[in-house]
Image (cartoon, rainbow, N blue to C red):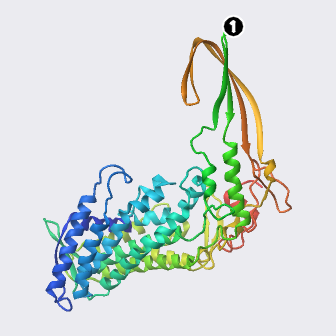
Amino acid sequence: MKSFKKLLIVIIMGIMLFGCDEVTDVDKIDDVLADQLAREAFDLLNDKLLDLEEPVGTPQQGEDLFPEADYNKIKAGFEAALTEAPDNALANFGMAILELASINYDEDLWTLIDDFDSEFSEGRLFNNQFSFLVNTPLMYVKYLQNSMRAGDISFARIQNYIDNNVMPKIENSLNSLEVAVSLPDSVVIKINTGAEVLELDKGELYVFRAGVFAVSAAMRMITLYDLDLFDENKTYDWLDEISFNGDYNEIESYTYEPVGQILTLEYQDNSVENDSLLFHILKYNIADRPGFGTFRSGNLPNEIKSDLEAILYDLQNVVDYVSSETDDQSDDIIKFDYITQWNNDINNIQDAPNFASDWQTVDDIISWVETLLDGPVTFNEDLHGDGIQVELTIDFSRMFNPGLQNMKDYLPLHNWLPEEDWVNEDYWEDEQYWGGGTYSFYFQEQLIHVDSVMTVESHYYDSWVEPLELVDETGTAIDVENEMPYFPDYTLNGIFPGMDRDKWFDLLGIDK
């Protein structure tokens, strides 16, 4: 089945690859100056996007891809056109594209994200809006996994940047698109490909706006929670005490016995001091800082739901508008034939899950997702391939209202151990026959060569930190290797209504 993402690609590539020919509006836009200013700004934007289509080097190399001076110059052109005619179609649509392009090529934003997730930062937004939205929750997972392995770990740096620099551009883009899609059908934008002239009308505008709403929802997800790892003084001064360059098992000393030609290497795990401090900071934030894991001030998950509903609304608008068009569609980017093909593909899905078995049209999918966002939906699926239907009820609406207001309330049951008991130590040896040759190793950042080595004896002094223990409802420590963690709320605040520990075992196929 062709996805709506492909529609967005068509529009973006159309703008990036083709110049603008003309704007037609017999009812409203009759100001020649406004049209001229909009066309000039759009041409500048088009040229800039062509230059940026294949940037040299990785996304984090080279000069600023979209300099602020270029952004301001193009924006001023669109603003001048809108001053002459606020409903100029080309100026409004161009402004919307400009804002998204500015975010897409914002090196400050993507470098911040790249600090802890280089794979995520490479995706960007053009042709990737919906994938960006779907993968955004994984950013929190990646952050929590990697936040203790790099110096630039303040998640708030990203969140504050999005609040101050990204969200205003998204809002401006959506405001411009609101004007563009409210114009009468007589207003169309013509794109001259050189080989043909294509028509950009409300159908394409709805698709583009759905993509902007997807970006908005993703950015709201990123900025939803306070996950900063402060110390007791509400600072990041503790980073000055951390070393991120040492190996966990370094050679502390070595000796060589010429008689037996025995090289003895003494290894020491140097991670324990770092890990102890890092877990101390984590304990402080989880156990003693009330704001950690809660909604940031002014951020609510219901705003994310509003963006998701807006996506569905615009996708339905695409289907309805294109399906009802009666004019010649030979020059349309999105044609009625596409809707027919999507419906045919949906109606012929093979081995569809039970919840999709009644889907016949795009409208059915949109309606189903709307239902999923609005209240409990019960699934009956063969999850384990054993022919047994497993029932699961999910109420996604609870994710947005009231949402998981404090993530600390849903962590596995645990007890923090006294910090003086965190460090554990072990000792073990390894012997390797070398046969009288030269043995080389690094010691204090220098490569050492020892000749005539018959045997290499390695002595390891391992240390590790265990700051907490997982417990059951009685507070008794559990064997984490053989027992699933216990949770305070198996329903996740009603997202999984009626779920308990035994039902999770059944759902996951775990023997009790």
Look at label 1 and name its amino acid: Val
Residue drawn at x 73%, y 61% is 412
Quadrant where the image shows the N terminus: bottom left
Image coordinates for residue 448, horizontal then vertical, percent = 56, 22
Residue 393, located in which quarter of the rendered image?
bottom right
Lateral position of residue 88 relative to residue 135, left or right: left
User: Viewer-proximal residue, 115 or 190?
Assistant: 115
Q: Is residue 444 above or below residue 393?
A: above
Image coordinates for residue 426, horizontal then vertical, percent = 77, 35
Q: Is residue 331 visible?
A: no
Q: In this figure, which residue is indicated by the disc labeled 1?
A: 259
User: Viewer-proximal residue, 358 or 118?
Assistant: 118
Binning the other alpha carbons within 10 Å of mark 1 as few (below 14), some (14 to 19) or many (20 upward) gives few
Image coordinates for residue 366, horizontal then vertical, percent = 45, 76
Q: Is residue 52 above or below residue 255?
A: below
Residue drawn at x 47%, y 66% is 133
Extreme top residue here?
259
Q: Is residue 501 visible?
A: yes
Lateral position of residue 392 relative to residue 142, left or right: right
Residue drawn at x 32%, y 82% is 321
Q: Is residue 315 above or below residue 264?
A: below
Image coordinates for residue 79, horizontal then vertical, percent = 27, 81
Local SS, label 1:
loop
